[in-house]
C-alpha cells in the first residue's frame, strides 16, 4: 500500500526537478550565445584592426603620392635627384631625436645615413594651407638648382623627401656651427680668431655668393637671407654659406603674404621699398656681415641702434669707424698691428660701400672678393695688386702662422718672465704649427722670413 504523502513528495520532487532543468537549459543557451558572441567579437578585433591599419596605410600612401607629385617628384626623379622616403628620414634622424637648430624654414635635425655619413635634415613647421600651391614647377626647379649647384663654400644639398606637404631637405652636416655663434656666443676664444682667419671666412663666403650670382644667366641665384647665422664653419673654420635655397623657398611660399623674408637687421632698405630681391640685396647684407667680423658686434635691429646705422654714423663723424673695431684683433701686442689697422680700415671702407643706399653705388660680389683679397695682402705685407690666387693663399697662411706664433710667444712670455724674445725664428714656425699641415718651400719660407724681419723691426714693436 503506497503512501500518498510519499507519492506527493515524490511527485513534487519530480516537478521541481523538471522545472529547474528547463531554467538551466535556457541559461546554458544564453551562456552559449554570449560566449559565441564574445568569441566572434574577440576574433573580429584583430581583423578590424588589420582592416583599419590597411586602410590608414593606403590613405597615407595615397597622401604621400599626392605630395610627391605636387612637389614635382616626377620631374626631380627624371633628373636623377636623390629622394628619401619619410620612413628613411625617421630612421636616419632616430625619429627626429637630435635637434640642432631652427629658423624661418623650420627645425633642423642631425642624422646618420646607412653609409655612416652625418647629415642635417630640415623639416618645415608650416601648417595649414599648402604654401606652394600653384608653384609646383617653380618648387621643383628650385630644388633642382640647389642639388646641382656645387661650390666648396656652399652647403651641399644631398637630397630631399617629397612625401610630406612641405618637402624635407637633407644637407651635408657642417661641424663647427655658425659664424654667429663663433662671434657672439663664445664658442671660440677671441684670441683664436685673428684677423687673417676672419678674412679667410669673409673671402670664402664672398666667393660663394659671387658664384651664385654668376649662375643662372638673366636670372642669377640670389640668397635673400645673408647673415652670420647662415655662414657655417667646417673643418679649419672653412666657411660654407647655407640656406640660400630655403630662403628662396620661403620667398615662394610667402610671395602672396606681403611678408619680409630674412632678418631685418640685414635686410636691404631697397627691398623694403620695392619688395624685390636683387644681387645688390645680398651685397648689402654681406656688408653687415663684414661689420660683424671687424667689430664683433651683433647686427641687432633696435631702432637707430643697428650696427650698420651706427657704424656709418661713426664714419661720418670721425672719418673712420676705428672706435668700433674689435680690440681683440689689436690688443695682444701684435707686431703686425699697424698692418692690421690698415687692413681693418680697408674692410670698413668696403663694408660702407656695400651699405650704400643707391644700389648702383654698391660693388658686385665679384668686386667684393677682389677687394678682400687685396685686404688680405695688405695685412700680410704682400703686394697690393696683380697678385695670383696662390700668392694670396700663401701670404694669408704665412700671416696666420706669424700671428699664431706671436700669440704663442706671448703666452710663453707671460708664463716664463725670463724668456728672451717674443718673436720666434721663422724656421721653427712650421714645426710649431704642424696641425695646420703646412710645409713651406724655399720661396714661401723667404716670404715668411721677410714678414718676420719686418715684424722684428724695432720701430714696429
Image (cartoon, rainbow, N blue to C red):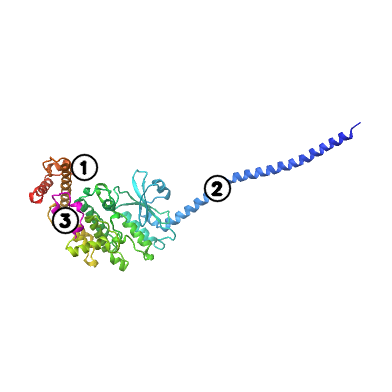
Frontmost of labels 2 and 3 is: 3
The residue identified by callout 2 is 49
Residue 102: % across, % down: 36, 53
Q: Residue furthest right?
A: 1
Q: Residue furthest front?
A: 417
Examine the structure image and report whether residue 160 is included in the region drawn in magenta: no
Question: For residue 376, which numbered disc appears in the image?
Answer: none
> What is the span of residues highlighted in magenta in the rendered image?
321-343
Q: Residue at x 54, y 50 (%)?
A: 52
> Element type at marker 1?
helix
First in residue order: circle 2 vs circle 1 = 2
Quote the CA–CA distance across marks 3 and 1. Answer: 27 Å
Q: Quadrant of residue 24?
A: top right
**Residue of label 3:** 343
How many numbered discs sit on the rendered protein?
Answer: 3
Q: Is residue 330 magenta?
A: yes
Foreground tag (2 vs 1): 1
Q: Which residue is mark 1?
A: 435
Which residue is nearer to you in this view: 120 or 146? 120
Amino acid at each position: 500500500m503506497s503512501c500518498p504523502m510519499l507519492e506527493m513528495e515524490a511527485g513534487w520532487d519530480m516537478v521541481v526537478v523538471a522545472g529547474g532543468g528547463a531554467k538551466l537549459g535556457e541559461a546554458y543557451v544564453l551562456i552559449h550565445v554570449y560566449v559565441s558572441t564574445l568569441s566572434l567579437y574577440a576574433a573580429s578585433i584583430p581583423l578590424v584592426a588589420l582592416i583599419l591599419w590597411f586602410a590608414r596605410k593606403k590613405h597615407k600612401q595615397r597622401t604621400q603620392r599626392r605630395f610627391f607629385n605636387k612637389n614635382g617628384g616626377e620631374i626631380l626623379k627624371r633628373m636623377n635627384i636623390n629622394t628619401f622616403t619619410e620612413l628613411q628620414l625617421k630612421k636616419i634622424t632616430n625619429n627626429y631625436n637630435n635637434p640642432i637648430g631652427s629658423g624661418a624654414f623650420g627645425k633642423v635635425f642631425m642624422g646618420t645615413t646607412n653609409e655612416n655619413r652625418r647629415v642635417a635634415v630640415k623639416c618645415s613647421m608650416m601648417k595649414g594651407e599648402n604654401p606652394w600651391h600653384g608653384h609646383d614647377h617653380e618648387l621643383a626647379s628650385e630644388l633642382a638648382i640647389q642639388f646641382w649647384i656645387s661650390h666648396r663654400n656652399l652647403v651641399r644639398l644631398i637630397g630631399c623627401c617629397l612625401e610630406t606637404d612641405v618637402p624635407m631637405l637633407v644637407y651635408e652636416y657642417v661641424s663647427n656651427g655658425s659664424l654667429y655663434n663663433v662671434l657672439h656666443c663664445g664658442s671660440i676664444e677671441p684670441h683664436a680668431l685673428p684677423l687673417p682667419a676672419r678674412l679667410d671666412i669673409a673671402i670664402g663666403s664672398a666667393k660663394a655668393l659671387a658664384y651664385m650670382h654668376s649662375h643662372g644667366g638673366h636670372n642669377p641665384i640670389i640668397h635673400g637671407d645673408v647673415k652670420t647665422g647662415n655662414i657655417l664653419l667646417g673643418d679649419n673654420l672653412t666657411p660654407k654659406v647655407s640656406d640660400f635655397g630655403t630662403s628662396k623657398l620661403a620667398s615662394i611660399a610667402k610671395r602672396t603674404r606681403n611678408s619680409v623674408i630674412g632678418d631685418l637687421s640685414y635686410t636691404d632698405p631697397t627691398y623694403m621699398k620695392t619688395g624685390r630681391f636683387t644681387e645688390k640685396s645680398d651685397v648689402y647684407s654681406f656688408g653687415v656681415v663684414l661689420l660683424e667680423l671687424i667689430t664683433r658686434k651683433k647686427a641687432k635691429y633696435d631702432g637707430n641702434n643697428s650696427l650698420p646705422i651706427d657704424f656709418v654714423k661713426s664714419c661720418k663723424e670721425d672719418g673712420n669707424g676705428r672706435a668700433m673695431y674689435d680690440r681683440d684683433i689689436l690688443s695682444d701686442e701684435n707686431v703686425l698691428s699697424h698692418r692690421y689697422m690698415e687692413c681693418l680700415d680697408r674692410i670698413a671702407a668696403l663694408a660702407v660701400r656695400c651699405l650704400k643706399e643707391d644700389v648702383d653705388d654698391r660693388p658686385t660680389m665679384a668686386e667684393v672678393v677682389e677687394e678682400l683679397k687685396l685686404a688680405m695682402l695688405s695685412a700680410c705685407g704682400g703686394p697690393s695688386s696683380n697678385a695670383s690666387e696662390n700668392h694670396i693663399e700663401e701670404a694669408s697662411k704665412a700671416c696666420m702662422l706669424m700671428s699664431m706664433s706671436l700669440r704663442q710667444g706671448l703666452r710663453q712670455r707671460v708664463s716664463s718672465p725670463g724668456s728672451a724674445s717674443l718673436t720666434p725664428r721663422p724656421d721653427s714656425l712650421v714645426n710649431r704649427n704642424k696641425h695646420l699641415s703646412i710645409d713651406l718651400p724655399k720661396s714661401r719660407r723667404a716670404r715668411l722670413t721677410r714678414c718676420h724681419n719686418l715684424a722684428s723691426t724695432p720701430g714696429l714693436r
